[in-house]
Structures are given as C-alpha cells and as structure tokens.
Amino acid sequence: LNHSAIAIENARVYAETRRQSVALRRYLQGVAHALSSRKANQNVPEVIASLTREAIGCDRAALYLAETAADGYVTVRQLAATGYRASESWLCPEQGDCGAAWVARKGRALSAPNVERDGRFGPGNKWERPKAGAYAAVPLRTDGDVLGVLEVVRRTPLPTGANDLRQL
C-alpha cells in the first residue's frame, strides 16, 4: 500500500514539475520575442510584467528599476504593472521603503506567503502592509549588479505549504 501511495505522489509531483516547466518555457519565449521585436524599447517592461503574471498565476505583477543616488542609497521606480490595482504604485511609495526597494538594496529575494502573519509588514514594522495576501520579489541582475526587481502579489494568502511564489 505504501508503495502505491508513493508512486501516485511521484506521478503527481512529476506532472506538476512538467506543467511548471512548460509555463516557464512559454514565459521565456515571450520575453525573448518581446526583446527581439521592433517595439522592444517601448513595451518590454509591460510584456515582462504581463508574462510574469500569466506564468505565475498571480493577481498583480510589477517591474521596478533600481536607481542609485549620489550618496549610494538605492530606491526603486515602477516601470510597469499589470493586474490588480496595476495603475497604482501602492507597494512602493515615492521615496519610501518597501519590499521591492529592500530586494534592490540587498540583492536577495523576498517571499511572504501570508503577508498578514508576516512580522516584516504592517504599522510599526519594516514596511507598511501591502494590500495583499501573498507577496514575492526577486532581484534582476546582470554582471552582479541589481538592475531592477520583479514583484508578484496575490490577493489571498497561499495555503500552508504552497510554493507558487517560490517558482519566481
């Protein structure tokens, strides 16, 4: 009986891995197509945000540009967003601190499967609590430098043990 359960679980894990692989391949093909198109300079940030939202299955995706001031302080500026409240740069206010700015400064990913329970967010804590259930952001690098941040948001928290945001 245990061998059957293990075989069934292995088949489920294989199918999920294959599904994620296909989604990632489509995502990368879309990015490559956007970069090679004639209008690449005009719409690449929007295409990347849109493809990320589609590939991850999140409610909002945003792309930020990391900017370093003369004093070395790193801030981020939203280049594009798609999905839930896309017209608002509500997770990273002007000159404010936020998850995306932290990722740009530290060069490390940030993941909060349940923002409500994460002590890093909220009044009196590191960042204001975003209007989100789950949050993740990853640095975009070239030659060791952080050029920007890709951020995804779900309106609802992830179930315990879920790893949807980790695939980013």
Image (spheres, rainbow, N blue to C red):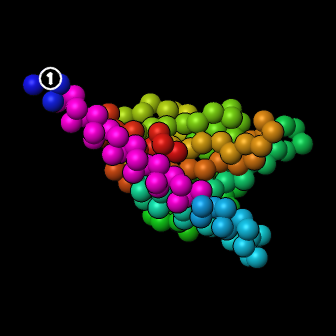
Task: Quickly name the residue at label 1.
Answer: 2
Residue 15 in magenta stretch = yes
Which residue does the image show at 82% across and 44% down from the upper left?
68
Which residue does the image show at 60% across and 50% down from the upper left?
150
Our reading of the magenta stretch's main secondary structure is: helix
For badge 1, the amino acid type reads Asn
Residue 10 in magenta stretch = yes
Q: Quadrant of residue 110?
A: top right
Locate residue 139, reporting x and y percent: 65, 42
Left or right of 37, for residue 62: left
Left or right of 98, for residue 111: left
Range of residues picked out in magenta: 5-28
Locate residue 15, reporting x and y percent: 33, 45
Q: Nearer the viewer, residue 38 or 108?
A: 38
Which residue does the image show at 54% across and 65% down from the upper left?
50
Q: Is residue 27 visible?
A: yes
Q: Nearer the viewer, residue 28 or 159?
A: 28
Q: Quadrant of the N terminus?
A: top left
Q: Secondary structure at mark 1?
A: helix
Q: Quadrant of residue 88?
A: bottom right
Q: Nearer the viewer, residue 69 or 27?
A: 27
